[in-house]
Image (tube, rainbow, N blue to C red):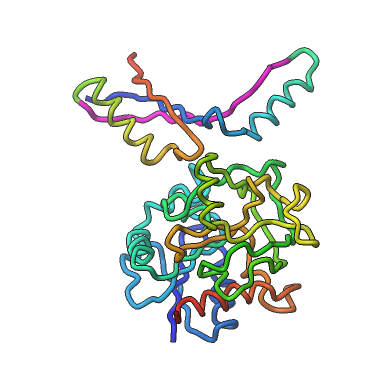
Amino acid sequence: MARFAVLVFPGTNCEGDVLHAIEAVTGQPAELVWHKEGSLDGFDAAVVPGGFAHGDYLRAGGLARFSPVMEPLIQMAESGRAVVGICNGFQILQEAGLLPGAMLRNESLSYVCRDVRLRVEANSSPLTCGLAPGATLRMPVGHAEGNFRADDDVLEALEADEQVIFRYCDDGGEASDAANPNGSRNNIAGVRNARGNVAALMPHPDRAYEEALGGVDGCRLFESLHRFTES
Amino acid sequence: MKFRVRVLVRLRPSVYDPQGEAIRKAIAADPRLSAESVRQGKMFDLEVKAGSPSEAKARAEEIASRVLANPVLEDFSVQVLLD
């Protein structure tokens, strides 16, 4: 059995979706953990869901890293357990220094809310360990700041080390400009850390885990996360 | 002593600024106005307790680098306001 923590900051708004998705897809228990908690003992994995943590004041995810729960979250990452972020959770993990890069305002300046297609680039992460590189998945994005930026040398290192786990692609699997919803460098939609236990993506698997939501491809990510906790 | 310190945070020159570019286009839409380029940023005024202006500046620089600016995208400048 695996226990999943779903972190909740003031302004987080996807915790219910993530909690339900984990339980429905994996059959494992998940618990909401308020950002004031000082411990994540007993959890095998933590998910930082989407929303607007601390109102996204200062920068998207910029204030969340000062919440008390971040210290045990960083310890969890250092211990090798799975830590994953979705959307605002991705931004929070970047601000906390657990994942590389930063998110700039979308190139269009618009909040983008639509389905995208993702190509799996590497299966060396808690979100992709059950997936085949080259496979494509469809799920929605919903963000204003998802424009992935990193300096050239950082980007080169990420690519060389296969730390890019998802890229925006078209229906044919090509990572084209037209398929890029926000201007992200190299069409990057998701990355992992060097060790391979911290990963995040901007799209929402928690909005694509049953047919009633318009797609089930998000299930593959939660299945991967479950599988990672058992390895 | 309390010092007022102004911190300016801006995108690093190598980072494309979509908001600044949109503002530049809005300026260019008025035939009486034009700007070759626009870069937007943030301004913070802090009150800092310190023994001297240079100490106040050092304290504000630490706050700026730890909290106010994200070094992946931004850099900052700090000015002690003497009135």
Q: Nearer the viewer, residue A128 or B30?
A: A128
Image location (x, y in percent) of residue A139 = 70, 66
- A158 to B52, vertically: above or below: below
Query: Would you say A134 lies left or right of A71 here?
Result: right
Residue furthest front as drawn: A160
Q: Quadrant of residue A219?
A: bottom right
Residue furthest left as drawn: B51
Query: Would you say B74 lies left or right of B54 here?
Result: right
Image location (x, y in percent) of residue A169 = 73, 57
Image location (x, y in percent) of residue A106 = 66, 44
- A142 to B58, vertically: above or below: below
Residue A29 is at least partly visible in this image = yes
- B53 to A23, vertically: above or below: above
Q: Is residue A231 magenta?
A: no
Residue found 53% across the figure and 68% down from its top: A15
Q: Which residues make up the magenta segment?
A: B34-50
Q: Is residue B38 magenta?
A: yes
Number of dots carrying numbers: 0
Q: Quadrant of residue A137?
A: bottom right
Residue found 58% across the figure and 42% down from its top: A104
Residue A36 is at least partly visible in this image = no
Query: Would you say A189 lies left or right of B77 here?
Result: right
Residue found 78% across the figure and 49% down from its top: A178
Residue found 45% across the figure and 81% down from its top: A230
Q: Nearer the viewer, residue A85 or B40?
A: A85
Query: Would you say A124 lies left or right of A180 here?
Result: left
- A92 to A33, vertically: above or below: above
Looking at the rendered image, the quarter that the C terminus of chain B falls into is top left
Looking at the rendered image, the quarter that the N terminus of chain B falls into is top left
Q: Nearer the viewer, residue A231 or B32?
A: A231
